[in-house]
Image (tube, rainbow, N blue to C red):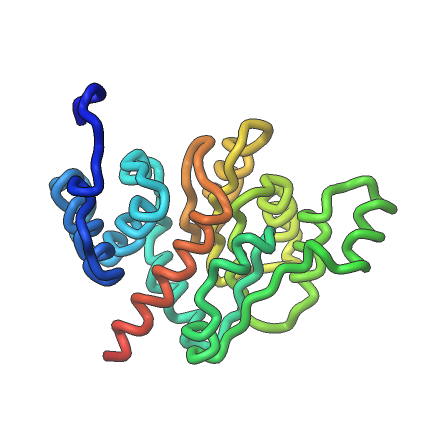
């Protein structure tokens, strides 16, 4: 848009909420062209772009083979979604998850987690993974902030103490972020990972909701 042009209210489109979303996805499809794969991954990629306005996710969002299908199957079986931040937790569509028989949890504010993290001199995010490992149920682990959560997941996967049905690995930042994502991509656990530095709690929640949206669609 011309930087010298003064914007007025006449330049604002008056649209209903659903129309705004429809138009947004229309713009995403137009600008992405044929760069988005024409398969089940498309819904997730488009929703991440819709959340972030960042088309780099077309190239950076990586899916292990069958990861989306594995996530949907886990949700059908009542999997719990564990997040590393309350921000991601708040963004997940709880009603859709409840319909599938699942729940969403974040242990970061739990008193026992804080005490154990202080005692061990580690992050709360890593202790949360240990707590999740004691849950005897299918889990989807969604990480949008803490690379230490992914590192601990890798350690516990290697020792056979946890096997999530799906890992959503999209922490954002600079220290150990890239490396932690690469570790997860070296496991045999299904994953959806935002390779590189980009990500965030909003992206983690968005991917969870995209899976729930696909699940609702599969039910007709």
Q: Residue at x 17, y 40 (%)?
A: 11
Q: Nearer the viewer, residue 199 or 190?
A: 199
Direction from residue 94 to residue 3 in the image, left or right: left
- Percent across and percent down for residue 199 are 45, 40
**How many numbered marks appear?**
0
- The residue at 59%/28% (across/down) is 175
| Horizontal arrangement in the rendering, residue 95 relative to residue 24 (left or right) | right
Viewer-proximal residue among 92 and 176: 92
Q: Position of residue 5 (x, y in %)?
A: 18, 24
Q: Position of residue 124 (x, y in %)?
A: 72, 48
Instruction: State the quadrant of the C terminus.
Output: bottom left
- Residue occupying the far top of the picture: 4
Q: Is residue 75 left or right of residue 117?
A: left
> Foreground residue, 57 or 92?
92
Residue appearing at x 48%, y 43% in the figure = 200
Horizontal and vertical percent position of residue 32: 17, 40
Place residue 57 in its image quadrant: top left
Q: Nearer the viewer, residue 22 or 170?
A: 22
Q: Is residue 116 left or right of residue 125?
A: right
Query: The N terminus appears in which quarter of the rendering?
Result: top left
Please determine whether, in this image, residue 111 is positioned above or below residue 126.
Answer: below
Q: Residue furthest right?
A: 119
Residue at the image position 79 percent from the left and 47 percent from the top: 117
């Amino acid at each position: 848009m011309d930087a010298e042009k003064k914007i007025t209210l006449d330049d604002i489109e008056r649209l209903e909420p659903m129309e705004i979303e429809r138009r947004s996805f229309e713009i995403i499809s137009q600008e992405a062209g044929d760069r988005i794969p024409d398969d089940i991954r498309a819904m997730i990629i488009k929703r991440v772009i819709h959340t972030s306005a960042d088309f780099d996710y077309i190239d950076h969002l990586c899916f292990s083979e069958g990861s989306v299908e594995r996530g949907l199957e886990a949700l059908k079986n009542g999997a719990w979604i564990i997040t590393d931040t309350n921000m991601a937790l708040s963004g997940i569509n709880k009603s859709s998850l409840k319909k599938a028989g699942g729940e969403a949890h974040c242990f970061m504010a739990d008193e026992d987690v804080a005490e154990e993290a202080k005692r061990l001199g580690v992050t709360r995010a890593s202790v949360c993974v240990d707590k999740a490992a004691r849950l005897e149920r299918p889990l989807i682990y969604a990480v949008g902030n803490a690379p230490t959560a992914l590192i601990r997941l890798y350690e516990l996967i290697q020792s056979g103490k946890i096997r999530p049905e799906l890992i959503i690995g999209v922490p954002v930042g600079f220290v150990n972020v890239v490396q932690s994502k690469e570790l997860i991509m070296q496991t045999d656990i299904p994953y959806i990972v935002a390779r590189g530095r980009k990500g965030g709690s909003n992206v983690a929640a968005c991917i969870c909701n995209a899976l729930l949206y696909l699940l609702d669609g599969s039910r007709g």
